[in-house]
Image (cartoon, rainbow, N blue to C red):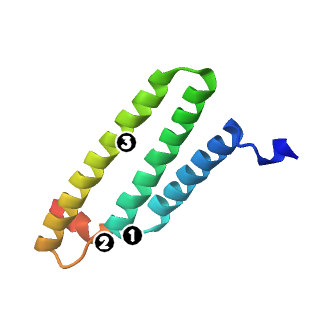
């Protein structure tokens, strides 16, 4: 019964894969740029969960340090993406991706 309650590396890997594929589904299906940005963040965080889990499993703290650095990069990426979306919203009344494509011409 005690083994049933223990959380192993397979649970962390399953969580990371689930987060990654939910994010991938959001990127492929949604058309709102804010939701696409959030979905890309989910994909990135899923990969970080798996990295940290494998790092803990092998007993090396370097992977956890890289995962922490990845979280910092993800935060900066999200702030930069949101700044772009705010600037885009000032120029156009929508944040849908197909409408952003018109800015190329």
Residue in the image at 41% along x and 29% along y: 66
> Any mark on residue 71, and which?
3
Residue, disc 2:
96
Q: Which of 72 and 96 is in front in this view?
A: 72
Q: Which residue lies furthest to the right in this view?
A: 1
Mark 3 Cα within 10 Å, few/some/many (few <14, many 20+)? some
Q: Residue furthest bottom?
A: 93
Element under label 3? helix
Residue 33 quadrant: bottom left
Q: Work out how far the residue at label 1 is from the one at label 2, CA to CA, in angstroms.
A: 6 Å
Residue, disc 1:
31
Q: Which of 79 and 94 is in front in this view?
A: 79
Describe residue 67's horizontal placement relative to residue 10 as left or right: left
Q: Nearer the viewer, residue 2 or 75?
A: 2
Element under label 2? loop
Q: Give yes or no for contact between labels 1 and 2 (Cβ–Cβ under 8 Å).
A: yes
Q: Which of 20 and 10 is in front in this view?
A: 10
Q: Which residue lies furthest to the left in this view?
A: 91
Element under label 1? loop
Question: Measured along the vertical axis of the image, is residue 11 above or below residue 65?
Answer: below
Describe residue 33's horizontal placement relative to residue 3 as left or right: left
Tally the marks: 3
Query: If you read the primary sequence from the N terminus, does the residue marked by circle 1 or circle 3 appear first?
Result: 1
Mark 2 Cα within 10 Å, few/some/many (few <14, many 20+)? some
């Amino acid at each position: 019964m005690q083994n049933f309650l223990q959380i192993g590396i397979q649970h962390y890997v399953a969580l990371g894969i689930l987060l990654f594929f939910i994010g991938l589904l959001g990127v492929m299906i949604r058309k709102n740029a804010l939701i696409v940005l959030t979905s890309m963040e989910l994909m990135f965080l899923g990969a970080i969960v798996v990295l940290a889990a494998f790092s803990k499993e092998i007993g090396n703290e370097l992977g956890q340090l890289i995962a922490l650095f990845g979280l910092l990069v993800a935060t900066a990426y999200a702030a930069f993406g949101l700044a772009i979306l705010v600037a885009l919203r000032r120029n156009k009344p929508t944040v849908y991706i197909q409408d952003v494509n018109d800015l190329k011409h």
